[in-house]
Amino acid sequence: MPDPTLSVVVPTRGGAHRLPVLLDALATQDLAEPWEAVVVLDGDVDGSRAVLEAYADRVPLRIVEGDGGGVAAALAAGYADARGDIVVRCDDDLTPSPRFLAGHLAHHRSRPAGAPPLGLVSMTRDVFADTPYASAYGRPANERLLAEAYARPASERWRHWAACNSVPRAAYEAVGGFDVAMGYREDSELGLRLAESGVEIVIDPDLEVEHRGPAPDTATRAARAFTSGASTVAFEERHPGTHTTAPAPGGDPWSRVVRAAAGRIDSREDAAALGRKVDRLLPRLPDRARPKAVAWAVEAAAVAGRRVGDAAWVRDAPAATVGTVSVVVPHHGDPSPTLALVDQLTAQTHPVQVIVADDASPTPFPETAGVRVVRRAANGGFGANVNSGAAAATGEALLVLNSDLTLEPTFVADMVAAARQHPRAVLAPRMVDEHGEEAWVGRDFPRIRHHVAAWLTPLARFRGTDAWHRAVGHDVRARRAEAEVDWVVGAAMWIPMQDFRAVGGFDERYFMNSEEIDLQRRLRERGVAVVALRSPTVVHAGGGSSPSESRRRWLVEGMMTYADTWGSRRALQAALTAATGANLLVNAARRATGRDLRPLEVARTELSMIRGRR
């Protein structure tokens, strides 16, 4: 096989959910000459090797083992192993167009004889979900960065040597390659040395690449700003005069409020906490105030980072990765949906332990290769069944999934990635039904007024309004942006296993409904957050196997059990009894107008549910 003309070096760690998109894009490159992709696997923490090996027949791929020493060390290893005369750096969250490699090679080939070597930069255009952060700050900031880059004088273009670029291997080696001691800004530091050595750096707008991994919210952006600010000290030590290591003294009001906030930030975690506060406020702020709120948090984090950073500063250690995930699927009834879900789980890009908890089903779940089946002797309901499955789990995280879900192959990997952003939290994916209608995943802890609003028949006409959803306890923010909420619905729920076991799992007094609220309230008391994600998305067919009256009785029984623990059962019963009286009057009036209603029968049914059995 001839030596490649061009090598693409991709550093990756925890990229199992990102790599397929990049590899699909590389598989469509229209470059006719030999080339190679050198992927540096900097520790296989999530099954990335299996993802890479699946592309061996579509991409000219070689895997280099990293030592877990960070991005600079991984890049240095990849460049050292590259065989092409031109080396392209490409992060694992980019999506290059089919003409990307050919475009880079054409630039290098077109250099006049005697011209200095070329360093070519592809700027990255960020791709955002439609969130308040993205519209207020994310997209505008990226547009400003792109405009600034394309207007840079030649002497300043090294500042944009980052996620995607190319340079002759000889020119890279001549400057000594990456400084592996750099914990951050290892890319632009190399770009500066290349420029100082005589490499002409060019930024081509026609070779922009799509970037799928920008900061999705203020919390993440502020944390990154702190990291970036802290790293300037080490950069300035190597290259004096290239970065300002202290905030300008400015006395204008904006500078004062930024410095005041920066004075309360001493770590990356503090910066993220400030960002989360801004994220919670954004949906309620006027449109014109939103960009300023985000900018305030980001600039304050950067100023604080410059204050805290020192010459020996290194990138924050990445959040602990989840090595193993145990999926528990409760089963009762027809095994077909559970079997279909098991098939989807075995196709996941991230390895999982699959446990089916059979709750004394009238049709037992069949023994299935690769699946641990836990069989209960008696039907105990959702919580008891999940507890039985979790007792057999060996993973660091518990993923509880209803059997009537449809998942993408990267679903578990996406949840693992989200857990790295929220290392001690209950997480729930975005959820839609078969018709694409989004479920209300994020909720407020139930109060009597929520139950009464849901019980009152006259309010049903307002079900499509935000006011009604707020009245019944739905967290409206969580439909617009990733949000920390009181609790999430239990149809698809990620729980740190250590915390799940520490609180004793689900309370088995609940048969069906409210058990996940009780669990998450106990987890909250232990310091575990709850986050409703905007990605990934699952399709939930939703409870069609039980009669609606049975579902409502289980719902009310769960409400009453929850009230026994966290509130007042008597107060709830009295409020719902009053609401039943109001429903009786309304239904009687409707029957008088000719509606086919039985007001007394409806009232008796409602009262029997309210009184229930204790």
Image (spheres, rainbow, N blue to C red):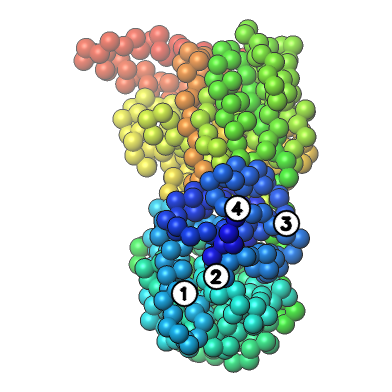
For marks 1 and 3, the one nearer the N-term is: 3
- The CA span between labels 3 and 4 is 13 Å
Tag 2, which secondary structure?
Answer: strand
- The CA span between labels 1 and 3 is 29 Å
Can you identify the residue that label 3 sits on?
65
Q: In x, y percent, where is residue 133?
A: 44, 60
**In the displayed structure, would residue 279 be above or below residue 479?**
below
Q: Nearer the viewer, residue 536 or 124?
A: 124
Q: In x, y percent, where is residue 555?
A: 54, 23
Q: In x, y percent, where is residue 31?
A: 45, 58
Tag 1, which secondary structure?
Answer: helix
- Point 28% across, 10% down: residue: 596
Q: Residues within 10 Å of mark 3 (few under 14, many from 20)?
A: some
Q: In x, y percent, where is residue 399?
A: 65, 35
Can you identify the residue that label 4 sits on?
61
For marks 4 and 1, the one nearer the N-term is: 4
Q: Nearer the viewer, residue 27 or 92?
A: 27
Badge number at residue 285: none
- Point 43% across, 63% down: residue: 102
- Of the two numbered discs 3 and 4 in the rendering, the one whose residue sits closer to the viewer: 4
**How many marks do you count on the picture?**
4
- Of the two numbered discs 1 and 3 in the rendering, the one whose residue sits closer to the viewer: 1
- Point 63% across, 57% down: residue: 39
**Amino acid type, residue under disc 4 in the picture:** Leu
Say if mark 1 contacts mark 2, CB within 8 Å.
yes
| Residue furthest front as drawn | 1
**Amino acid type, residue under disc 1 in the picture:** His
**Amino acid type, residue under disc 3 in the picture:** Glu
Can you identify the residue that label 2 sits on?
86
**Amino acid type, residue under disc 2 in the picture:** Ile
- The CA span between labels 2 and 3 is 21 Å
